[in-house]
């Protein structure tokens, strides 16, 4: 435990060349204007060895997850947010999903583009969509585990590459830099808007499952 704590202090004390006002400003917008609880992520490994600065050599979301503080520390308090990103200006911005904040449905980038196109053709209104080089995440209204369970139970097949970020989950937000590269808006919130509108989860899941199972071929897990 001492080794882990010692590494934790070292990695959290690093100050990258990036970050600064853009990350602080974005984090403050999410927390104070939109009332989305956020906290700093662990950040990518500057040595590029595992992609993540955390002690886990097999980290599955390199640089894009909480470490210290833990997820329960996520807050909308401006003073805390400002202190975190002043101390760690290059830290990714991590959203604690669920509760008063949006949830998300994520899938690999190529089928995600197909799902968005299908939703556009159907005339469905979409809210913000977060994208990295490998996965896109469609923000949706908060849902319960019971609601999600009933929705998935009604499906003949749910691809393993479909992921859900609900209560107790998290998601890196733009303009973070993570192990998978830059996090950006594929569909950005309207500039100067109040809390962004997001759709219900049902229609998004329908389009995502269809995109992943089209022609009977499941997209590779990423």
Image: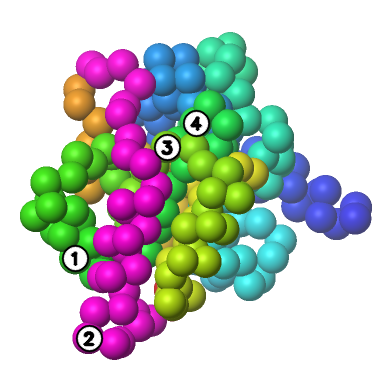
Q: Position of residue 161 (x, y in %)?
A: 44, 72
Question: Residue tagged by mark 4?
Answer: 101
Q: State the extent of the magenta-drawn residues as a range.
A: 192-220
Identify the residue at image location x=61%, y=56%.
53
Question: Residue tagged by mark 2?
Answer: 215
Residue 93 visible? The answer is no
Tally the numbered discs.
Answer: 4
Q: Is residue 96 magenta?
A: no
Q: Position of residue 203 (x, y in %)?
A: 31, 52
In the rendered image, which quarter is residue 21 located in? top left
When the figure is inspected, residue 191 is found, relative to residue 148, above or below; the finding is above
Q: Between 70 and 177, which is closer to the camera in this rendering? A: 70
Secondary structure type for disc 3: loop
Q: Earlier in the sequence, mark 1 or mark 2?
A: 1
In the rendered image, which quarter is residue 49 located in? bottom right
Question: Residue tagged by mark 1?
Answer: 114
| Farthest residue, direction top | 79
Which mark is in front, 1 or 2? 2
Identify the residue at image location x=23%, y=37%.
188
Tell me the CA gap for discs 2 and 3: 29 Å
Secondary structure type for disc 4: loop
Secondary structure type for disc 1: helix
Which mark is in front, 4 or 3? 3
Question: Residue tagged by mark 3?
Answer: 141
Secondary structure type for disc 2: helix
């Amino acid at each position: 435990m001492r080794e882990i704590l010692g590494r934790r202090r070292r990695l959290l004390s690093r100050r990258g060349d990036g970050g600064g006002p853009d990350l602080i400003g974005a984090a403050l917008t999410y927390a104070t204007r939109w009332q989305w609880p956020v906290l700093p992520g662990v950040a990518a490994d500057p040595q590029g060895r595992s992609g993540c600065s955390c002690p886990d050599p097999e980290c599955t979301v390199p640089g894009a997850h909480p470490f210290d503080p833990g997820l329960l520390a996520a807050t909308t308090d401006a003073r805390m947010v400002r202190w975190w990103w002043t101390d760690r200006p290059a830290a990714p911005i991590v959203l604690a999903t669920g509760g008063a904040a949006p949830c998300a449905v994520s899938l690999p980038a190529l089928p995600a583009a197909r799902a968005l196109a299908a939703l556009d053709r159907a005339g469905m209104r979409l809210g913000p969509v977060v994208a990295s080089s490998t996965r896109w995440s469609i923000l949706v209204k908060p849902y319960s585990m019971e609601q999600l369970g009933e929705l998935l139970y009604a499906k003949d097949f749910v691809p393993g590459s479909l992921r859900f970020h609900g209560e107790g989950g998290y998601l890196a937000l733009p303009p973070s830099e993570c192990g998978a590269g830059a996090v950006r808006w594929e569909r950005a919130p309207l500039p100067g808007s109040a809390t962004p509108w997001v759709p219900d989860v049902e229609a998004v899941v329908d389009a995502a499952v269809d995109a992943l199972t089209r022609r009977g071929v499941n997209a590779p897990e990423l």
